[in-house]
Image (cartoon, coloured by chain):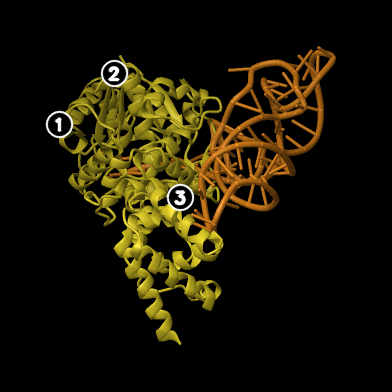
Chain colours: A yellow, B orange
Amino acid sequence: MVVTRFAPSPTGYLHIGGLRTALYNYLWARKNHGKFLLRIEDTDLKRNSKEAAKAIEEAFNWTGLSYDGDPIYQSQRFDIYKEYIQKLLDENKAYYCYMTKEELDELRKEQMARKERPRYDGRYRDFKGEPPKGVEPVVRIKVPQGETIEFEDGIKGKVSVKVDDVMDDFIIARSDGTPTYNFVVAIDDALMGITDVIRGDDHLSNTPKQIVVYKALGFDIPKFYHVPMILNPQGKKLSKRDGAMDVMEYKRMGYLPEALLNFLVRLGWSYGDQEIFSMEEMLRLFDPHDINKSASAYNAEKLLWLNAHYIKNAPYERLIKELEFFGVHIDDHDKKEILIDSLKERSKTLKEMAEAALKILKEPASYDEKAVKKFLKEENIEILKKFKEALKERENLHLPVDYEEFVKEFLDKNELKLKNLAQPLRIALVGDTVSPSIYDVLSIVGKEGIIKRIEKLLNHLQEEN
RNA sequence: GGCCCAUUCGUCUAGCGGUUAGGACACCGGCCUCUCACGCCGGUAACAGGGGUUCGAGUCCCCUAUGGGUCACCA
């Protein structure tokens, strides 16, 4: 059984890199019919973990990810950690260290002056005397000296470090008794039965420390997969300055969750030449062993392209529902299907789509000056007037094909080309020269609306002169 | 600075000793066309550098360079 976990520290929102590691853990667990657990790493009590849990909940709901059971809060497990600290103390695998912070700082300063690597010197490792008064001790773990720690990372391959190079007897409990990160991570992963740890590769150099804890406590060591970071478009570390970090911001910008997930899964992972992955395909094909070894840069254009793809292929009921978030309510509009179908071909985001819809649904509030100048010369105005009159006489106009037929008849009768009519008419309908097919727009606006809009434009032109 | 990790078109990537180094996004042409898009067709563009190993290296090894991560009584 595969058990994975997502273990964010509470920062207030779920960011895009976090979502990717959550997705990887989710996919791997679900693919293997295992469990995907959530753990909030809130041992730093300063931050509000409730809020963070809510934010994660919200982002998971939106993207469709789900975790098993209830989230685990490290802040509620201090008793457990205390127990294991005591166990190590009792077994002489850990010890109290009475060195004060000031003394430690002093030591480090001296070591640096001598160009040595700053590290705790182990002075209390085998201390047997009378402890100094007035010092609340920390607890340090006895790191086995002279050893080499090796582990097989599912992504990076074999990783091997000499213990003496990378760690001293690190602190597992602060002087106030609270446990530290590398200690609790190991304990929780072991107690939660985590078999596969998929996390950011900023944790790669923590792993040996955690392995020391696993070994000291006699726990089984899980498999590790350290996934490379996501870089910003400049190839630097992704930060808040790079725009959207909060997953929910993508919703506000008009992205479909499946586009975001597809984008994220392909960032660092691939399956041959395939670009489009449904959730079912991800579930079937994803394997953390295939994740790339190197960091990948965030490519906003590709995300946009994917989003456009998913919009194009979404059923229109779905899009109608999604557009409500952006203030477009067309559920009872009789031409809603035509509207959606013609808009989804040309929208990269839902937000864009909503704006385009409103542009058609509402009478133009103003007219694009350059367009007016270019396309509304005297002769065009006459054509528009004629068109309006002809339209008044005509009945049974509903679908785009009806309008197409009508327009063709009108053009034939007056010996005109579509070019003579299309742009002037488009300006009357939407205010400028950009819109979906003129027949679609005519159909959506409807006979009465068209007449009103042509008259409005005509009035506007008269006022101008 | 020590340690660890990485390096194929601008970007995401395929490649797992023998390929005209493939695909996708973006970009540039063309077609389609009532505008804008969609779509279709075509194009530019990459193995960081240097040494080995090998009949043969993008693929294996070493060095250099560059980038990243990490070295807390943060997580």
Residue highlighted by disc 1: A79
Q: Which mark is residue A34?
A: 2
Q: Secondary structure at mark 3?
A: loop
User: How dense is the environment of label 3, judged by Cα within 10 Å: few (below 14), some, or many (20 and up)?
Assistant: some
Q: Which mark is residue A117?
A: none
Q: Is residue A143 above or below residue A176?
A: above
Q: CA distance from mark 2 to mark 3?
A: 41 Å
On the image, the x and y values in percent for residue B48 come to: 72, 38
Q: CA distance from mark 2 to mark 1?
A: 28 Å
| Residue A73 in sight here | yes
Is residue A446 shown left or right of residue A302? left
Q: CA distance from mark 1 to mark 3?
A: 58 Å
Q: Secondary structure at mark 1?
A: helix
| Label whose residue precedes the other's in the sequence (2 or 3) | 2
Question: Which residue type carries mark 2?
Answer: Gly
Q: Mark 3 and mark 2 in contact (Cβ < 8 Å)?
A: no
Residue highlighted by disc 3: A346
Q: Is residue A439 above or below residue A69?
A: below
Q: Chain for mark 3?
A: A
Q: Quadrant of the N terminus of chain A?
A: top left
Q: Mark 3 and mark 1 in contact (Cβ < 8 Å)?
A: no
Q: Please tell me which residue is depicted at 50% across the width and 41% down the height of the picture.
A: A117
